[in-house]
Amino acid sequence: MASFFRWRIANKVIPLISESIPCEKLIGPSTISSFVRINKFKSQQPQLFLPWKALTSALPQTNDLRSPNELVKLLRNQGLPTAEGFVDITLCQQPLSVVFTVDKHVFSKIILTDICANDEIIAKSSCLFQDISPKKVLVHCWSPKIGEIFKMSHFRSAIHSSFIANISKVAGHDVTKIIHTGDWGLESAATLFKFHQLDVKEQTNNLTAEHLFKISKNAKLQFEDDLNFKNDVKSYFEKMTKGDQDLVSEWNYLRDIFLKHYNSIYKKIGLTFDDTLFDSSYSAEIEEICKDLLKKNLVTIQEDQQVKVNVDVKKTENIFPDNEIDPFVYRLGRSIFSASHWKKKHNFDIMYYVAPTTESNFISLLIPVMKELGLDWSDSLHHVKLWNIGHFDKKRKNKGAEFFMNQAKQFTIEMLKRDLHMPEEEITSEMAEVLSLTSLIVNDMMHKRSTDYDFSWKDILSLSKKSGASLQFCHAGLKGLQEDSEFIFKVDIDTSPLTENVAHNLIKHLSRFDEEVYSSYLNLEPRVLLEYLFSLWYYTDKATNVLKLDIKDDRLIVIKARLMLLEAAQKTLQKGLHLLGVTPFETNYTPPDFIRE
């Protein structure tokens, strides 16, 4: 990337900032270099901007700072062009910035060599991440309780959890992906009792999660309406809590069927967890926390059977109707226990709850309640809010994520046949699955986390330049061009034959990759990186239409320089897709080092 130039700019500027104060007491080179940005707009030569406002805001208040004009004059007096490739240094007024113009051939050589020679984690080669202190980060994926359908809201939490984990690793943090599974309570007993009531034990060899979802749903409805059923469920649960081995064993059998179903979806998404917590393993400890909440009057059950949380949080509702089959107090107790368990086990600095906005009120109450219990570290819990997906019709409203994933796969196969005229024998199941899953993920991440969006098959299955399919086809095309070429280049080759504007526009865009990754990291917003990849597709498409790899028309040195450019584009796109949690489709694929780590 452009870190080479950012560091050189910092080292040139620091000695000249002040007339009298030693430079090392003012600001470090990593801070200045992180302010430098590459000009996005078309220009004859690449330009890097050092914003004056950002620079002076980071400096201590002093009257000894030189003016922008003085600084530029001193920089120019050192001689141009410089050994680093700077051919001009000027002042831009809107916004006020020091502008460093770089020789385009020097710029191309350094950028392409940096990309093609390195497979390391981006943070190691980018000055933008130098001042980020490594932390222990936990990413908590919001998941269905045992018996619940894996909904699209769970799918959304999974893909954003994957992205947050990936980009936090790139920033240098020690990341652990965690999941807390609710597998214990009256809901569990209700499902088990209904299972026994329906006498389907003889069919257990062919028992499916879909069948159990229906049983679980009907059990919850009957628990609300049938007093005898409710009493029988309570009796079942009492036996389970007292250690009835037959009932516990049968419940574990049903639970494992649910888990197998959930895990199959996570596997398709490409998300694995480093640590898993089950309520059933710590039910006694959770129960003690629930008793403590009531004893300390942090939670009270009112006469109307509503639950009140006795902490004052602005704009947060603290009175809730209680749900007997899923008590609020138990929900609060299990959340306090899980956070405490992971704090003790991992001693994290930050834990992200990646969950929908429907959980906002609960998490807003959870943190102050934990503080009242003396758990001051609860400030390190952060809710990454995911807004809602809307406009499902009646037929799809209650469908699970697997339904939409299967539909997307089938629609993708039809689209490949219809729109791309691809022969059926060339469309493998793996290809259709990767393309369809990419389309679902990319369509979601095109929207900001902080906005609702409507579900639309037309948008998801689009072949436009802003679609998941277009990014996959771009990557496959770049990989194919490299594999089909007879020629091999070395990273020390001459890149000066890259004279076309389309080549330099692409190189300049490639140089900005770490800027966009950094911006995505600061906001935990995949949309920023995704927009960059869409633009990468655009510049790559323009370049490949002009830069042919035909030895009949061009010299070998030109072909090799173009191959180097295309490999840089392919590697950058590959890294970007991986950060988003998307696997580029290709045969015998080996992920780069930063993914394997």
Image (spheres, grey):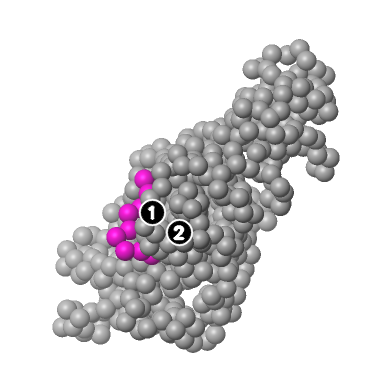
Q: Main secondary structure of the magenta part?
A: loop
- Residue 457 position in % (x across, y down): 53, 80
Q: Which residue is mark 1?
A: 487
Q: Measured along the vertical axis of the image, is residue 378 above or below residue 409?
A: above
- Residue 48 position in % (x across, y down): 68, 40
Q: Earlier in the sequence, mark 1 or mark 2?
A: 1
Quadrant of the frame with the N terminus: top right
- Residue 358 position in % (x across, y down): 56, 64
Q: Are marks 1 and 2 in contact (CB under 8 Å)?
A: yes
How many other residues sit within 10 Å of disc 1, few (<14), some (14-19) or many (≥20)?
A: few
Q: Which residue is mark 2?
A: 551
Label 1 to label 2: alpha-carbon separation: 10 Å
- Residue 251 position in % (x across, y down): 24, 68
Q: Secondary structure at mark 2?
A: loop
- At a point 49% along the width and 37% down the height, the residue shown is 125
Q: Secondary structure at mark 1?
A: loop
Magenta region: which residues? 583-594
Q: Measured along the vertical axis of the image, is residue 315 above or below residue 490?
A: below
How many other residues sit within 10 Å of disc 2, few (<14), some (14-19) or many (≥20)?
A: few
585 magenta-colored: yes
